[in-house]
Amino acid sequence: INLHKTFSTPHGGGGPGAGPVTVSEALLPYLPVPRVVKTDDGFSMLWSDENSIGSLRGFSGSFLILLRALVYMRGMGGDGLREMSETGVLFANIIRKRLEGAYHLQYDTPTMHEVVFDDSVQVKHGVHNTDIAKRLLDYGFHPPTMSFPLVVHGALMIEPTESFGPEEIEAFCEAMLAIAKEAEETPELVRAAPHETPVRRVDEVRAARNLKVRFVEED
């Protein structure tokens, strides 16, 4: 179960994502131990099981993220989850219809909760998906998922959530259309974006090439 976005858990910045795996009763005996099991008196820890694959070396996941998703689902209820899902699908399709033509639609198949465009139209003017993302910041919007899925070169994957209102979806579409026009008429403006943020363009690969995984006090 992919908990990010759909069940209110974070995803941006690389996590803390969580994806619990559900199994049928036939696979229960093989699950790792220790695990929590339900008993007549409540719950207890099962420390061993003769058919278990054993213990995992790595941590089994982020408990608080799983708890957040559970609380969200219980709070929404079945009807609420259905309405939430339908709203997300509706917004994705609105964005698709508003932006197709200005941006290349990668797949001409029915759109569910996300729609994938690419930057092939804008690349003709020297503008790439990363430039579009930076320019969106000037319009007050967090950029969508960039360069994913990996099979789509220059991908722009837009996943609107149900928490937005129609007005915000429309404002986002207007911003994207304005950027598409800028890419055609004044591409240098888009390539130099963002212009209105406290921090301009940063070296996005420096962190990966100069890996620091703990705090080190500078001299």
Image (cartoon, rainbow, N blue to C red):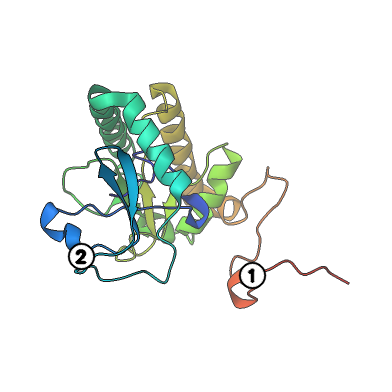
Residue type, label 2 = Tyr
Name above or below for residue 112 compared with residue 186. Answer: above
Q: Which residue lies furthest to the bottom in this view?
A: 209
Q: Which residue lies furthest to the left in this view?
A: 26
Disc on res. 213: 1
Q: Where is residue 187 in the image (x, y as percent from the top left)?
A: 53, 53
Q: Residue furthest front?
A: 41
Q: Which residue is nearer to you in this view: 175 or 181?
A: 175
SS for tag 1?
Answer: loop
Q: Is residue 193 left or right of residue 144?
A: right
Which mark's residue is nearer the viewer, 1 or 2? 2
**Observer able to see residue 83:** no
**Which quarter of the rendered picture does the C terminus lie within?**
bottom right
SS for tag 2?
Answer: helix
Residue type, label 1 = Val
Residue on which disc 2 sits? 30
Q: Which residue is drawn at 24% across and 62% down?
A: 31
Q: Which residue is drawn at 43% across and 38% down?
A: 68
Determine crowd level at label 1: few under 14, some 14-19, many 20+ residues with C-alpha closer than 10 A. few
Determine crowd level at label 2: few under 14, some 14-19, many 20+ residues with C-alpha closer than 10 A. some
Q: Is residue 192 left or right of residue 20?
A: right
Q: Which residue is nearer to you in this view: 170 or 212?
A: 212
Q: Position of residue 120 (x, y in %)?
A: 36, 59
Q: Which residue is nearer to you in this view: 193 or 155?
A: 155
Q: Which residue is nearer to you in this view: 206 or 125?
A: 206
